[in-house]
Structures are given as structure tokens and as C-alpha cells.
Amino acid sequence: MERAKVVASILLIEFLLLHNAISQAFDESAAVRTLKQEPHHTHEVHCSRERSRAAWQIIEDYLMPYVEEEGYQISNKCRLHPDSDLFRDQEQHKIYLDVNEWRCGYCKKSFRAEKFLDQHFDNRHYNLLNVNHSKCLADLCGALHCDFVMNSKSLRAKCNPAAVARNRHLCEGPSAIRLHELFLHQFCDAHTCSGKRKPFLKGGKKQTSLLYMASSILILMLLPIFYLLYYLYQREMNRGTQVLRRVSQVGRKTKPS
């Protein structure tokens, strides 16, 4: 009788374990099916986020410092205005925390790299794109020399006169006319196959070098130590002088008269 109870208990335990395993397997397969069936809400946008980001960085570094210096106000209708950037609001909601940590400014989720945050924007925050009024800033990359800044492979290709003429025409459009010689010298004159002219001849935004910052911090840290060592050295020198004086005075007193 006792043996039968033990066997029955073992069979019951095995049945419960088997039932639990089957339930877990069913739940996992259901979860997988749910993930596969769940739409990612990826909407196709015919505008390169990467090139738009490069175009805006060029505008911010090589155009806006001189525009602000001259007190010029860019019209809302101008294609160089921030409102003309399809991704501007999303780019402003990127929070860079560390080399391997980016955070979404909308929902505070963290990501290991900027490209994953871009994918998150495409999947979860597509509705925040201003698709009705904004234009694709990447369309101006030809005029703004995005390939030059991005070190694109297209720079190594043979110069295409037709493409150069098209980019120069785009560069010399209404936006360039309003900004006159500045825009022409900074961007348009470099659209040539001669290779003699480089873009951004007037320079750009002055950025503090990381090496300069590190050197400044190191100097500020070492300066107090230097003065402390100098102070201790001077104090030891003064003590040594006083000891020599005392020794000389004692020597004089001991001499016979």
C-alpha cells in the first residue's frame, strides 16, 4: 500500500512538471506569434535621416555663426530654416549621456547607439514628424557638400560636370541670393571639377578642442601643487639660512679673545 502511494505521488509530480513545461512552451510560442503579428509601425519616409542630420550640422557650423553675427533673420519660407527639417523635433529630443548610452526625450528609454534611437523614433514616434509642412533637408546635400563632411565614397569617384552644374544651380537658388556673397563663397564656389576650391573657406563654428580642455584642466590641477612645492622649498631654504646663522654665531662666541 505504501509503495503504491509512493508510485502515485511520483506519477503525479511528473504529470505536474510535464503540464508546466507544456504550458510554458505554449506561452512562449504565443508570445512569439504576438511579436510577429504586432506591427512595428514603420512608415516609409523618402528622406534620409543621416544626410538630413549632416546637412543641418553643416548649416549650424558653417552658416549660422555668420548669419547671427550679421543679425540676419532667416525667413520661415527659406529651405535653410530649422522648420524645414523633417527630423528637427526628433533630433532635439535626443539625449546623449555617454559613448554607449542615448536616451529618448519623449519616453525616456535608453539605447546603446544613436542608430537604435533612430529606429525607435521611426517605430514609436513617427506621429511626431512634421510631414505636412516640413521638407527633406537631405535634398540640399548636393549644395551643402554633405559628402565632403561625411567622407563619402562618392568623393573618390570621377567628377561629373552635370552633377556639379546641378548642385551649383541648387546652391545659387533664392536662399543663396538672400545671403549674398557669404553663401556663395562658403558653399557655391566649391562646386567645380577643377578641385582648386574647397568648401567652407570662411571657416565655421569655433569648437573647443578636447586636447585643449584636458590640458587646461591638467594645468589648473598642477598649478596649486607647483606653488605648494615652491612654498615648501622656500621655507626649507629659510630654515637652512637661519641654522647657518646660528652656527656662525656660536662659532664666534667660542673663539678665544
Image (tube, rainbow, N blue to C red):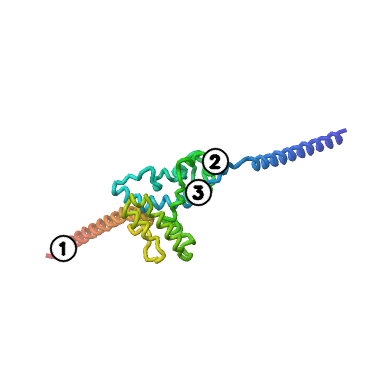
Is 119 or 232 nearer to us in this picture? Answer: 119
- Viewer-nearest of discs 2 and 3: 3
Circles 2 and 3 in contact, beta carbons < 8 Å: no
Q: Is residue 184 left or right of residue 3?
A: left
Residue 66 in view in this figure: yes
Q: What x and y, as percent, mark residue 56?
A: 42, 50
Is 16 or 93 nearer to us in this picture? Answer: 93
Q: Secondary structure at mark 2?
A: helix
The numbered mark, 2 or 3, whose residue comes first in the sequence reads 3
- Viewer-nearest of discs 2 and 1: 2
Q: What x and y, as percent, mark residue 138?
A: 46, 51
Circles 2 and 1 in contact, beta carbons < 8 Å: no
- Viewer-nearest of discs 1 and 3: 3
Q: Residues within 10 Å of mark 2 (few under 14, many from 20)?
A: some
Circles 1 and 3 in contact, beta carbons < 8 Å: no
Is 187 or 178 nearer to us in this picture? Answer: 178
The residue depicted at 39 percent of the width and 48 percent of the height is 80
Per the model, the C-alpha gap separating discs 2 and 1 is: 94 Å
Q: What x and y, as percent, mark residue 76?
A: 38, 42
Q: Is residue 85 left or right of residue 186?
A: right
Q: Which residue is mark 3?
A: 47
The residue depicted at 37 percent of the width and 66 percent of the height is 196
Q: Amino acid at mark 2?
A: Arg
Residue 170 location, quadrant: bottom left
The residue depicted at 44 percent of the width and 63 percent of the height is 161
Q: Which mark is residue 124?
A: 2
Q: Which mark is residue 252?
A: 1
Q: Amino acid at mark 1?
A: Arg
Q: Secondary structure at mark 3?
A: loop
